[in-house]
Amino acid sequence: MTEMQLKYGCNPNQKPSRVFMANGTELPIEVICGRAGYINLLDALNGYQLVSELKKATGLPAATSFKHVSPAGAAVGLPLSDTLKKIYFTDDVELTPLASAYARARGADRMSSFGDFIALSDECDKATALLIKKEVSDGVIAPSYSDEALEILKAKKNGNYCILKMDTQYKPEPVETKQVYGITFEQGRNELDINEELLSNVVTDNKVLSPEAKRDLMISLIVLKYTQSNSVCYVKDGQAIGIGAGQQSRIHCTRLAGQKADNWWLRQCPKVLELQFVDNIKRADRDNAIDVYIGDEYEDVLAEGTWQNIFKVKPEVFTVEEKKAWIAKNTEVSLGSDAFFPFGDNIERAHKSGVMYIAEPGGSVRDDNVIETCNKYNIAMSFTGIRLFHH
């Protein structure tokens, strides 16, 4: 198949719509089930590149949860703690490394992952398919699928779930093009290999990057390579825990991603784990309720008396002081930035979310101020010398 007709483009009024190989060769994707949309394919192809690079850099199976051409989460297949199993709602599935990767990718920002497109680095197995089965998702792309996984996934969405198979032997052309307003843009593909060597120029007083920190910094940079810019990414224990994408100001990226990282950590607080939900509550309603509970407006929700629709027992208010005390316990977080930090305020905000390791290009006229702020908190920071803008 050299081309695929699509229902419409980004919006229903944008017709006709198709994807095709300009050189007349076969498309490297096979539609096993369902029908892919324009945005689905953008998510699928960006996501597959991301997980392929994560696998190459770490040697571990990888997964990502994509929404609107940026990852909501991404992770490698490290084992889950009992707490993570609980907040990711995986208690009823015997996890494989790939399933662990997807649980982490989906669990980082469950609200943003609602209706995601999934990319997997390895063959989709039964355990991963069982996790996908439970979630609201548009589709999945992987290099292959086990027979059991296909049977599970083909039953999703009344048989209309989009299942794509990627040709692992496919190599794109070294120059890529796209059109904007009838004008063709051309550039060399971003084939930059992200590895530990990029982290060797540690410019802070603290020069120590643990193996885990190096792994997490590489993960953050690979995630950023496929995230709409400006962007920053917080990573801990092999998974993105907060991604700030597509912001015009870098401090807004850092704040947005930092808040998501804080929410991820707050979900693990005993006070949140002990919430008692009404029977048969929908997964999305439960996830949204948790985000409201750990947010700043929950006292208003309690006052309005709507809690009875969600909780069996009226929860105690999660006070600002309690949240700050719990967030302060989060440490060993790594942070990547797709371009240099122009001011030390980004470091101040990152520190509040437990960041101890940073990788950024460097090159700001205020690098000295940024380094000084890192030294203030004993943060180790590498200047990679490379920018990772993606549009």
Image: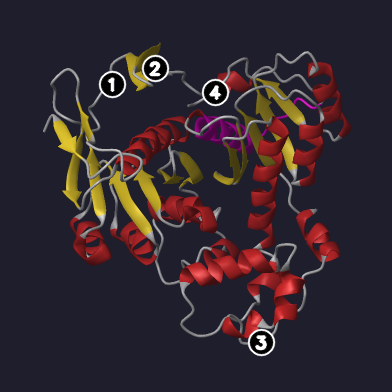
As drawn, the label of residue 212 is none
Q: Residues within 10 Å of mark 3 (few under 14, many from 20)?
A: few
Q: Residues within 10 Å of mark 2 (few under 14, many from 20)?
A: few
> Which residue shows up at 18% across the image and 57% down it?
147
Q: Is residue 284 above or below residue 239?
A: below
Real-space CA distance between mark 4 and mark 1, rounded to the nearest whole angstrom: 19 Å
Query: Closest to the observer: 223 or 35?
Result: 35
| Label 4 sits on residue | 388
| Label 1 sits on residue | 172
- CB of mark 1 within 8 Å of CB of mark 2? yes
Which of marks 2 and 1 precedes in the sequence?
1
Q: Position of residue 283 (x, y in %)?
A: 47, 70
Q: Is residue 72 magenta?
A: no
Q: Is residue 216 above or below residue 320?
A: above
Badge count: 4
301 to the left or right of 349: left
> Which residue shows up at 50% across the image and 85% down it?
279
Disc 2 marks a residue whose amino acid type is Arg
As drawn, the label of residue 313 is 3
Does the image show residue 144?
no
Place residue 264 in its image quadrant.
bottom right
33 to the left or right of 206: left
72 to the left or right of 33: right
Residue situated furthest right in the rendering: 376
- CB of mark 2 within 8 Å of CB of mark 3? no
> Which residue shows up at 35% across the image and 44% down it?
120
| Label 2 sits on residue | 189
- CB of mark 2 within 8 Å of CB of mark 4? no
Q: Position of residue 297 (x, y in %)?
A: 73, 66
Question: Which image quadrant: the N terminus?
Answer: top left
